[in-house]
Amino acid sequence: MNQRWIFDGHIAGIGTASGLRAVVGLWAQSPFGPLTDAMVQLPSGHRILLAPTEEAGSFIGAVYNFDETRVVPLAASLAAGQLNVDAGPLRIRAGLGGRTRLGGAARLVPRALAVHPRWLRAVSPLAARILPGVHTAGTAKGGRQEYYGVTDLHRIDSASVSWDGTDAGPLAAIRPAVGFGFSSVPPEPSLARVRTTIEGAPVTPR
């Protein structure tokens, strides 16, 4: 029997000059309660999931593609235009900028429509043309269907990022696109207000 899971909150996408790229989810609502997770792609291409619990790591790893999963303490805050993330070896201090033109357009769509799977299937080809690598609907692992309903988008104008205590370099475009699933984050570092919907077969531990 198919099931549906909802993650509602924010996704931050950050690239660095060293080639390290990070996608951080700050979820006010998830199947596990409030949750922060981080997906990191090293300059070598090695993909690491940083999860707060074994349960969350097993679920996320059953939907997305990783070479390694680590359960680490995670702490994140988003307030007053500042994003702070401490996730094991990953440390981010990022300053938010203004709303993007796409964010302004997204806010014009009623939220109930903007996060609905039928709408997201319809607009996914347009999203991919506007932001290469970005899709709002697609297939996840296990044949599950996944939908990203973005209702706002802000620039990330500055960031200090380190991995294992080593500075990852200044903020840079997220190129090449991250390879955790069917969709990437926008090429330019940004923070999206998003509702992620996953539908399909029950997720079983790895």
Image: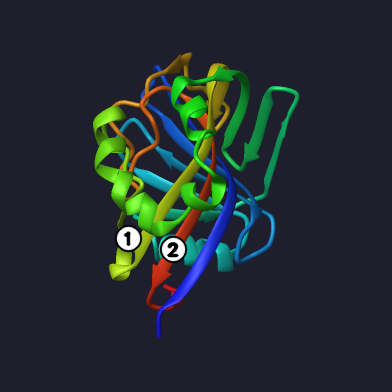
User: Does residue 182 appear anywhere in the picture?
Assistant: no
Quadrant where the N terminus sits is: bottom left
Residue found at x 31% / y 64%: 141
Q: Mark 1 points at which residue?
A: 140
Dot label at residue 198: 2
Cα–Cα gap, marks 1 and 2: 8 Å
Residue type of the residue flagged with mark 1: Ala
For the residue carrying disc 2, how many other residues have a C-alpha within 10 Å: few (<14), some (14-19), or many (20+)? many
Residue found at x 45% / y 56%: 116
For the residue carrying disc 1, how many other residues have a C-alpha within 10 Å: few (<14), some (14-19), or many (20+)? many
Dot label at residue 84: none
Residue type of the residue flagged with mark 2: Ile
Q: In front: 200, or 124?
A: 124
Q: SS for tag 1?
A: loop
Q: Find residue 81 and report its horizontal and vertical position in percent.
A: 69, 22
Q: Are marks 1 and 2 in contact (CB under 8 Å)?
A: yes
Q: In front: 134, or 42?
A: 134
Above or below residue 45? Residue 57 is: below
User: Does residue 115 appear anywhere in the picture?
Assistant: yes
Q: Find residue 145 and report its horizontal and vertical position in percent.
A: 34, 63
Q: Find residue 83 and report its horizontal and vertical position in percent.
A: 66, 29
